[in-house]
Amino acid sequence: MRKILQLSLLGAFLFMLGSTGLSAQQIAFVDSEKLLAELPARKIMMTELENYRTELEKELEVSDTEFKTYVADVMNKINGGELSPKQQTEAEAEIQTKQQNMKELTAQAEFKLAQKEQELSKPIIDKFNAALKAVAEEKGYAYIVDKKMFLYMGGGIDATEDIKAKM
């Protein structure tokens, strides 16, 4: 009796699944990491980003060199007995201020780099999303998921090349 109940529930579930059209929907996947890595626009973006990173690092190096020079100069004056205790205290406070400024400059550089990456990647992501939508509509896919999101995959429809062609 219990088996009959289980089978009838399973049959009712399959009937509902079939009648809602879910069985006709297709799921495809895309290897977005591979696709994006191969895009010429992304390679250009990465080059621009690396150049920008280099510029920011050079600016930080200049500030760091100035800071280290200042610290060395103050230390030489302290060791040479050229500063009074009050001047030494003021110089130490100035060193702490400059050190804090260096930390802020570093944080600003990291923020600028993240902004630049977002700015440069937005057109690529927009183009990728438009290609995803176009391929899904053209091929009749209800879902396109990233290949890495599957815990198990025993085949399926790979839409990577179709999406690449649309981009």
Image (spheres, rainbow, N blue to C red):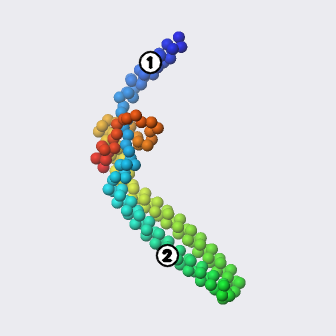
How many callouts does the rendering have? 2
Q: How crowded is mark 2: few (under 14 residues within 10 Å), some or many (20 or more)?
A: few
Q: Is mark 1 on a helix, strand or loop?
A: helix
- Could you tell me how far apart the alpha carbons at marks 2 and 1 are, in whole angstroms? 74 Å
Instruction: Give left or right: position of 24 versus 53.
Output: left
Q: Is residue 60 above or below residue 20?
A: below
Specify the farthest residue to the right. Answer: 85
Q: How crowded is mark 1: few (under 14 residues within 10 Å), some or many (20 or more)?
A: few
Residue at x-position 41% and y-position 64%: 50
Q: What element carries label 2?
A: helix
Residue under numbered circle 2: 62
Q: What residue type is labelled 2?
A: Val
Kindly identify which numbered label has been placed on residue 60: none
Which mark is nearer the camera, 2 or 1? 2
Kindly identify which numbered label has been placed on residue 11: 1
Instruction: Give left or right: position of 106 versus 91.
Output: left
Q: Quadrant of residue 74?
A: bottom right
Q: Which of marks 2 and 1 is nearer the N terminus?
A: 1
Instruction: For residue 134, say whether it is visible.
Output: no
Q: What residue type is labelled 1?
A: Gly
Specify the farthest residue to the top. Answer: 1
Given residues 23 and 147, the one toward you in this image is 147
Q: Is residue 80 above or below residue 29?
A: below
Specify the farthest residue to the front. Answer: 154
Given residues 157 and 8, the one toward you in this image is 157
Residue at x-position 53% and y-position 11%: 1
Residue at x-position 41% and y-position 62%: 49
Instruction: For residue 13, say whether it is visible.
Output: yes
Q: In this view, does 78 lie above or below 28?
A: below
